[in-house]
Image: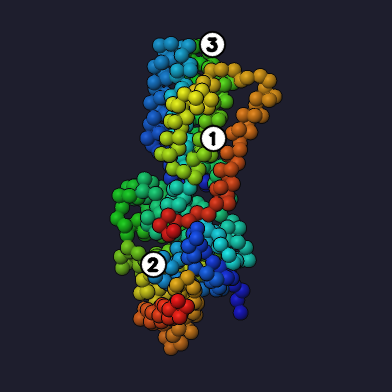
C-alpha cells in the first residue's frame, strides 16, 4: 500500500465534501460570466476561489480519524508520511484545479493578454492559503477552523496584516531571494508540524476514551 | 514451543490522568486466537487499537513479530475493524468494499448510512477480511448486530484465517460470542489482566459462556475484596 492507495482512499472517503466541490463549480461559472463581461476583472474572478479554498483545505484529519473513518487506511501498512501527503493533496486539489480553470478562462477572455491568476502575489496567496489552512486544521474540525478564518478576514487590523486576498494580482516583493524562502518557511513550519502530528500521533477512538 | 507473534510485557494504558489498565503481559502465537473479555470501559478497545498500531502503550512494550505494531504493519497483512459506527456514512457501500483489495465485495450502491446496522457491520467485516492471506486479525465486538447466518460466516472465516496462520484477537462483552471460539482468554477486570489458555479453563471440553461468566465474576469479586482491604 502506498501514497496512490492513500490518495484513492481519500477520494472515496471524500475529505472535501461534495458541497465544496459544487461551490467550486459555481465559482468557476461565476468567474466565466465576470470575465466574459470584463476581461480585466481577474482579481474579482479569482477571489471567491481563494476564499473557498481557505475553508475547503481546512479538511481536518484527527476528527474523522478518531471516529475510525481512517482505520482501514491507517492499518493498511501505508507509511504515515504518505498518508499525510495524500490527505494534504486530496484536500487542496479541488481549489488548485479551480484556480487553474479560472486562469484558463482569464487567458481565453483576454486573448492571452492578462494573467492575474499567475501573478507572483496570487501564486503566493494560493500556496499560503492551501498549506496553512490544511496544516492548522489537522487537529480541529472544519467549523472552528472556518470561524478562525472568518475572524482573520473580517477584523480590520488582523485582515490588514494576514488576509491573503490583498496579495491577489500583486507582484512578489523584492528581493526575491529573501521573499520566496521566507514564504516557503512560513508555509512549511505548520505543514511540518501537521505531518509530525499525523506521523506520531495516537488515534484513539472517540467512543473508547 | 512456538515463538510469540504478539507479545505484551507490562503494558499500561492511560487517557490523561485516567488509568485504563496496567501491566498487562501475554503472548500469542500465529495460529492462535485470543478472546479479550471484560466489562464496559475495561480497556478492550484501547488494547485492540494498541495491537493495531493506532495507540502506543503509556508504559511497557507491545511487539508484533518483535517490532512495534506500527512498524510491523508495513511488513504483515493485518485486518482491523472496530465496529459499524467507524464506517463513514456518506460513502457508497460498493466503493468502501473495493478499498481493501480493489475487488468489488458488494454491488450495493446505497450509502453506508442508509444500510441497516447489521449490513454495515457485515460490510466492514467483509472488507477487512477480504485479503486472502492475513497474518493478524484484530476485531472489536465483531458479532454485534449480525444475524445468525452472518454470525456463522464470521465464526467460520475467523477459524479459517487462524488455521491458515493468522494470529487472531477478538474482543467482546458478550461471553456467548467468544465461548469455545478462542484458544486463550484475557480477562480485563479492574485495570488488571489475567490470561488463561482454553485448556486451563476447561480441561475436559470446550469453554462455555457459563464458565467464562463464572471466571469473570470471581475476578470481579477478588478485585472488590482487594479494593476493600486496601481502603
Pointer 3 residue:
A113
Q: Quadrant of the C terminus of chain B?
A: bottom left
Residue B203 position (above or below residue A59): below
Question: Are there few (<14), some (14-19), or many (20+) residues within 10 Å of tag 2?
Answer: few
Residue B148 seen: yes
What subunit carries mark 2?
B
Disc 1 is placed on an element classified as helix
* Badge 3 vs badge 1, beta-carbon distance below 8 Å: no
At 63% across and 66% down in the image, what residue appears?
B66
Q: Nearer the viewer, mark 3 or mark 1?
A: 1
Label 3 sits on a secondary structure element that is loop
- Label at residue A93: none
Relative to A112, A144 lies left or right: left
The front one of B219 and A49 is B219
Name the spot of residue A143 as percent of width and height, x first.
41, 39
> In x, y percent, where is residue B67?
62, 63
Residue B193 at x, y = what percent? 49, 74
Can residue B105 be seen here? The reply is no
User: Residue at the location (63% across, 33% down)?
Assistant: A185
- The residue tagged 2 is B40
Chain letter for mark 1: A
Q: Residue at x 50, y 11 (%)?
A: A111
- Please check whether the numbered discs 3 and 1 fall on a single chain: yes
Asked whether the beta carbons under mark 1 and mark 2 sit within 8 Å of each other, the answer is: no
Q: Quadrant of residue A32?
A: top left
- Residue, x 59% and y 17% (percent of image)? A171
Image quadrant containing the N terminus of chain B: bottom right
**Label 1, on which residue?**
A132
Foreground residue among A199 and A110:
A199
Q: Does B221 sit left or right of B148 as displayed?
A: right
Judged from the image, the secondary structure of the residue bearing numbered disc 2 is: loop
Q: Quote the CA–CA distance across marks 1 and 2.
A: 40 Å
Amino acid at each position: 500500500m502506498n501514497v496512490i492507495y492513500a490518495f484513492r482512499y481519500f477520494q472515496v472517503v471524500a475529505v472535501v465534501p461534495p458541497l465544496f466541490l459544487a461551490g467550486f463549480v459555481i465559482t468557476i461559472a461565476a468567474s466565466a460570466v465576470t470575465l466574459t463581461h470584463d476581461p480585466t476583472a481577474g482579481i474579482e474572478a479569482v477571489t471567491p476561489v481563494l476564499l473557498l479554498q481557505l475553508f475547503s483545505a481546512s479538511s481536518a484529519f484527527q476528527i474523522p480519524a478518531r471516529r475510525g473513518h481512517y482505520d482501514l487506511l491507517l492499518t493498511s501498512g501505508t507509511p504515515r508520511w504518505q498518508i499525510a501527503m495524500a490527505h494534504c493533496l486530496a484536500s487542496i486539489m479541488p481549489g488548485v484545479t479551480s484556480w487553474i480553470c479560472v486562469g484558463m478562462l482569464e487567458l481565453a477572455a483576454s486573448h492571452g493578454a492578462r494573467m492575474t491568476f499567475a501573478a507572483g502575489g496570487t501564486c503566493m496567496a494560493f500556496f499560503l492559503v492551501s498549506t496553512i489552512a490544511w496544516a492548522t486544521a489537522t487537529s480541529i474540525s472544519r467549523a472552528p477552523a472556518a470561524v478562525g478564518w472568518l475572524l482573520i478576514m473580517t477584523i480590520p487590523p488582523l485582515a490588514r496584516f494576514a488576509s491573503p486576498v490583498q496579495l491577489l494580482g500583486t507582484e512578489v516583493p523584492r528581493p526575491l531571494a529573501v521573499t520566496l524562502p521566507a514564504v516557503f518557511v512560513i508555509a512549511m513550519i505548520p505543514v511540518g508540524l501537521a505531518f509530525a502530528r499525523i506521523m506520531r500521533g495516537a488515534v484513539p477512538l472517540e467512543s473508547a476514551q | 514451543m512456538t515463538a510469540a507473534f504478539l507479545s505484551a510485557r507490562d503494558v499500561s494504558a492511560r487517557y490523561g490522568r485516567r488509568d485504563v489498565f496496567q501491566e498487562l503481559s501475554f503472548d500469542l502465537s500465529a495460529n492462535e486466537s485470543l478472546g479479550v473479555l471484560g466489562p464496559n470501559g475495561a480497556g478492550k478497545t484501547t488494547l485492540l487499537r494498541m495491537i493495531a498500531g493506532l495507540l502506543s502503550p503509556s508504559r511497557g512494550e507491545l511487539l508484533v513479530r518483535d517490532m512495534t505494531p506500527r512498524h510491523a504493519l508495513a511488513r504483515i497483512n493485518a485486518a482491523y475493524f472496530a465496529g459499524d459506527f467507524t464506517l463513514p456514512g456518506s460513502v457508497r457501500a460498493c466503493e468502501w468494499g473495493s478499498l481493501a483489495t480493489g475487488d468489488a465485495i458488494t454491488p450495493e450502491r446505497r450509502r453506508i448510512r442508509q444500510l441497516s446496522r447489521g449490513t454495515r457491520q457485515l460490510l466492514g467485516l467483509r472488507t477487512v477480511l477480504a485479503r486472502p492471506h492475513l497474518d493478524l486479525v484484530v476485531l472489536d465486538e465483531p458479532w454485534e448486530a449480525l444475524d445468525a447466518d452472518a454470525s456463522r460466516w464470521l465464526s467460520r472465516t475467523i477459524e479459517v484465517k487462524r488455521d491458515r496462520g493468522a494470529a487472531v484477537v477478538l474482543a467482546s462483552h458478550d461471553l456467548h460470542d467468544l465461548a469455545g471460539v478462542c484458544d486463550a482468554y484475557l480477562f480485563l477486570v479492574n485495570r488488571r489482566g489475567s490470561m488463561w489458555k482454553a485448556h486451563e479453563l476447561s480441561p475436559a471440553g470446550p469453554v462455555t459462556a457459563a464458565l467464562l461468566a463464572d471466571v469473570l465474576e470471581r475476578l470481579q469479586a477478588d478485585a472488590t475484596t482487594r479494593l476493600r482491604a486496601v481502603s
